[in-house]
Amino acid sequence: MYSNSRERITDQRRAPVYEALENFRQMRVVPFDVPGHKHGRGNPELTAFLGQQCVEVDVNSMKPLDNLCHPISVIRQAEELAADAFGASYAFLMVGGTTSCVQSMVLASCKRGDEIILPRNVHRSVINALVLCGAVPVYVNPEVDKRLGISLGMCKEQVAKAIKEHPKAVAVLVNNPTYYGICSDLRSIVKMAHEAGMLCLVDEAHGTHFYFGENMPVSAMAAGADMSSVSMHKSGGSLTQSSLLLVGANVSKGHVRQIINLTQTTSGSYLLMSSLDISRRNLALRGKTVFSRIAEMAEYARDEINAIGGYYAFGRELVNSNSVFDFDITKLSVHTREIGLAGIEVYDILRDEYDIQIEFGDIGNILAYLSMGDRPQDLERLVSALAEIRRRFQRDSSGLLNTEYIDPEVVSSPQEAFYAEKKSVPLRDSAGCVCSEFVMCYPPGIPILAPGERITPQILDYIEYARRKGCSLTGPEDPDIMNINVLTGGNSGGALVQ
């Protein structure tokens, strides 16, 4: 039988959820509970596709396997081991992806009318959380690298200015790193936030490896942040949709659990939880070696791509001690505009002509996401393909759009705009109106427009250009994005918060 002991274990070689599932598989349990496939017997096609071992452990919460909503045994032990591995006060296993982590982090910190200081180049999940709770964004508009056209990190002076002008703000949120690998001065921002009596929240969707690699940018927990959302399924090796929410010593884990349970499923997937458990163990035991190898491969590929000519695989040379305080060298971000191709065009050619799937392409850049499963021969294939693409497809770069980021004019809070009276208008007729929904390229999922922001001709030009180049535009109610929802009477009103 299983033990529901509250013994706290610290041995990182253990994986309590995985161990409990393995024990469960050895028992001849007759299932009169959900899921209805009954260990795969009721759905042979699914079993054939996923495998018998997989469907056997796709089970429901029960006493021997604990309960994600209120863990007291193996899940709680797995969470404590994760906290120990990541240097956190506590860690929550999350099965709704890092979107769920980010939303729980914001909802645990903010209520309706509270101000939160954040960069505008956040993932849509952050602004979604503001729609849910009614908090008001105070944007620190990031600097833009004019050559690359990408937004950078948060300058310390801008954060200090925002804190001074909004002393009642309850939190500061930071990306660590951005999708492109750029990091802000997290330690200084944490210090400024705490001195002002504010929490510091960190979106570390792309920074799992910071906790285990050497010579990496500082992690949120090491910097003293209060909460951090970590995408274990990105660079940590777990299954898609599995993440961790880390909290520091000054945060009530009981309160955070209550917030998580407002939106997270009561039917937590044991496939996802066991993958978090096993992946945490792998990182704790082998992460240092793994990420050292990944960093070496990324640096090698960066040098090889830059030697091709026309491309710019950027790295630590961008560091300026402020808006680019540090750089994640595992991110193989490549600027493509100088060969006359938008990033999304290179993305499409790599997939369609060379059977290479990279993470994303946008207006001027591509990102090849490197992690523990990558091999040197795969990188050689990518480098060779990029060289061929330059030879075959290079053209005049004049006329290409040169910026990824447009400062917004915020007229109302995201929640007010999302729930306000609205009307649908043709996209090109919306200039001057206030948007009531999201428009973004996905990935990376950073909104071009968010609810409550003024629609400008520049933004409309960007949307149409992105569509022509083949970017995947998402967010609006109209799936074809020929129309957009705007506030009725939305042509008036000044900026709310900038």
Image (cartoon, rainbow, N blue to C red):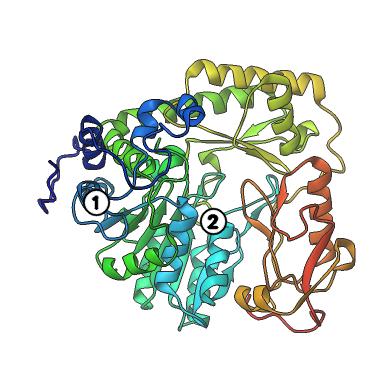
Q: Say if 465 sits above or below 428 in the image.
A: above
The answer to the question of whether label 1 and label 2 lie on touching residues, with beta carbons closer than 8 A, is: no
Q: Is residue 311 found left or right of 486 in the rendered image?
A: left
Measured in 3D between alpha carbons, the distance from the residue under mark 1 to the one under mark 2, in whole angstroms, is: 41 Å
- The residue to which callout 2 is attached is 153
Q: Residue at x 68, y 23 (%)?
A: 386
Toward the viewer: 241 or 432? Answer: 241
Q: Residue at x 27, y 60 (%)?
A: 70
The numbered dot on residue 58 is none
**1 or 2: tag closer to the N-terminus:** 1
Quadrant where the N terminus sits is: top left
- Tell me the kind of residue under disc 2: Gly
Q: Say if 303 sits above or below 438 in the image.
A: above
- Label 1 SS: loop
Is residue 176 among what the camera can see?
no
Q: Residue at x 45, y 32 (%)?
A: 371
- Label 2 SS: loop
Is residue 145 among what the camera can see?
yes
- Tell me the kind of residue under disc 1: Asp
Q: Residue at x 51, y 74 (%)?
A: 133
Between label 1 and label 2, give the one nearer the viewer.
1
Res 11 → quadrant: top left
Q: Is residue 353 found left or right of 248 in the rendered image?
A: right
Quadrant where the C terminus sits is: bottom right
- The residue to which callout 1 is attached is 66
Toward the viewer: 399 or 87? Answer: 87
Q: Is residue 420 found left or right of 482 in the rendered image?
A: left
